[in-house]
Amino acid sequence: MADTDSGSERPAPRKRADARRNERALLDAAAAAFVASGVDVPVRDIAVRAGVGVGTIYRHFPTRADLIVAVYRHQIEACADAAPALLADSDTPHAALARWIDLFVDFLVTKHGLAAALQSDDAAFQTLHAYFLDRLVPVCDHLLDAAVAADEIRPDLDAYGLLRGVGNLCIGAGNDPRYDARRLVDLLVTGLRVR
């Protein structure tokens, strides 16, 4: 007879596929709204972008902090999850790395839209930077390892340093129309190649 009082919790029920799609669409709409108008954008504007009612947003994310955290995590997961497909579909590991770095730049644009909220004292945001590093540094490291194994890039590269460098190049993008962060990042990634 099984022990029914073991104290172990049952796993949370998995969401239906359509519910996951709807949540992804809502998070994508919120991310776009945050980039366009900041994290204080009215919830009704996010609802219109997502094609849902305001109540749907509050049902999934009772507070603005819940929504911000979910958007940030969603963007990190999308960036992390893209790497294997890019490696499989690209002509070379360096091409996969370049395409992934381009996605990372897209993520950074969203992140900068969230910067003010993420730097606040709200406890909901305390673990997000560590989550970012824990998810994306190993992904970048894997892409770098594949490009090194293919003898396409120098072997002395560090994933954390590369991501930090890309992030630094993206700071201020959008503040000065003459500054093209994406072009500079492209030059950086091109410069990784073995001559």
Image (spheres, helix red, strand yellow):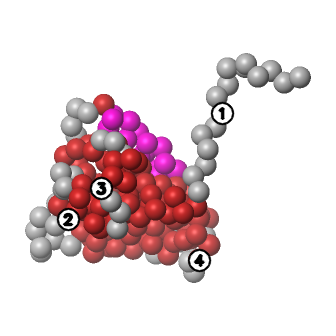
Q: Amino acid at mark 1?
A: Arg
Q: Is residue 112 visible?
A: no
**Where does residue 44 sit, x and y in percent of width and height?**
23, 59
What residue sits right under mark 4 in the picture?
Answer: 89
What residue sits right under mark 1 in the picture?
Answer: 10
Q: Name which residue lies at 34% across and 68% down.
A: 51
Residue 194 drawn above or below residue 77:
below
User: Within 10 angstroms of label 3, few (less than 14), some, or many (20 or more) residues?
Assistant: some
Residue 116 drawn above or below residue 106:
above
Q: Which residues are magenta?
A: 124-138
Marks 2 and 3 sit apart, C-alpha to C-alpha, by 19 Å
Marks 4 and 1 sit apart, C-alpha to C-alpha, by 38 Å
Q: Earlier in the sequence, mark 2 or mark 4?
A: 2
> Are dots 1 and 3 in contact, CB under 8 Å?
no
Q: Earlier in the sequence, mark 2 or mark 3?
A: 2
Which image quarter: residue 41? bottom left
Helix, strand or loop at label 4? It is helix
Task: Decide whether residue 115 is among the magenta residues.
Answer: no
User: Within 10 angstroms of label 4, few (less than 14), some, or many (20 or more) residues?
Assistant: few
Q: Main secondary structure of the magenta part?
A: helix
Marks 4 and 3 sit apart, C-alpha to C-alpha, by 39 Å
Q: Earlier in the sequence, mark 4 or mark 3?
A: 3
Q: Which mark is residue 54?
A: 3
What residue sits right under mark 2 in the picture?
Answer: 36
